[in-house]
Amino acid sequence: MEDADIIEAYFRRDEDAITETKVKFGPHLYNLSFNILKNREDAEECENDTYVKAWNSIPPARPAFLCAWLAKIARNLSFDRLKEKRQARHDADTVTISEEMAECIAAPDGIERIIDDRTFDRVVNAYLESCDKVHRFAFVRRYYFGDGYEEIAKYTGKTKNNVRTMLYRMRGELRELLEKEGITE
């Protein structure tokens, strides 16, 4: 079923919309959540919560890109779950990713405010569009989907150290752009 048909099924309140969403996007949503949470049960729960949130949001929402819209929901739910779990234990991989981006996005008002800023989105998107396909892929896989260096290296044909260095340089370039735009100090 095409994305537009799935969205129309949600608008009709047809429960097959959830089934079709799970068939088409389920593995992607699960992997996204698993990469953040590193726990099968939590990833499955976030995947299922994504379907519930989609059901409750469509209508009135009419996402232009259903996959990206669902991924954003799953990602936010996964990070919320991770915050809950962090109170009980420390997740080193995700903390490392957050620390890497904090180097790039030093903000007196907090990283959350900046990430919600549309100017920030515009600068990051423009930066990523200026990058070649491999760099863009690595950046998105690391900082949006939470993939590890080894996994990114496998898909890009680079070594783990090459990926780490490439992303370090990209964070530096992005930091310079954000400073130039006055988004960070």
Image (cartoon, rainbow, N blue to C red):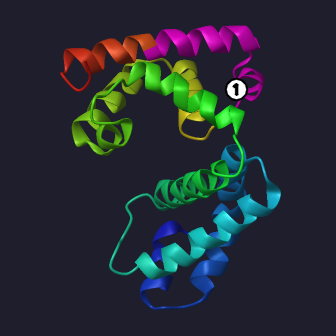
Is residue 150 inside the magenta stretch? Answer: yes
Q: Is residue 113 left or right of residue 73?
A: left
Q: Is residue 99 left or right of residue 109?
A: right
Quadrant into which the N terminus falls: bottom right
Q: Which residues lie in the magenta part? A: 147-171
Query: What is the secondary structure assignment of the residue under circle 1?
Result: helix
Name the residue carrying label 1: 152
Q: For residue 151, which quarter of the picture?
A: top right
Q: Residue furthest right?
A: 40
Q: Is residue 96 above or below residue 47?
A: above
- Tell me what residue is drawn at x 46 percent, y 59 percent: 69
Is residue 162 inside the magenta stretch? Answer: yes
Q: For residue 109, which quarter of the picture?
A: top left
Q: Depth check: 137 or 3 in front?
A: 137
Q: Main secondary structure of the magenta part?
A: helix
Identified by mark 1, the residue type is Ile
Quadrant into which the C terminus falls: top left
Label 1 Cα neighbours within 10 Å, binned few <14 / some 14-19 / many ≥20? many
Q: Is residue 122 above or below residue 72?
A: above
- Tell me what residue is drawn at x 70 percent, y 52 percent: 88
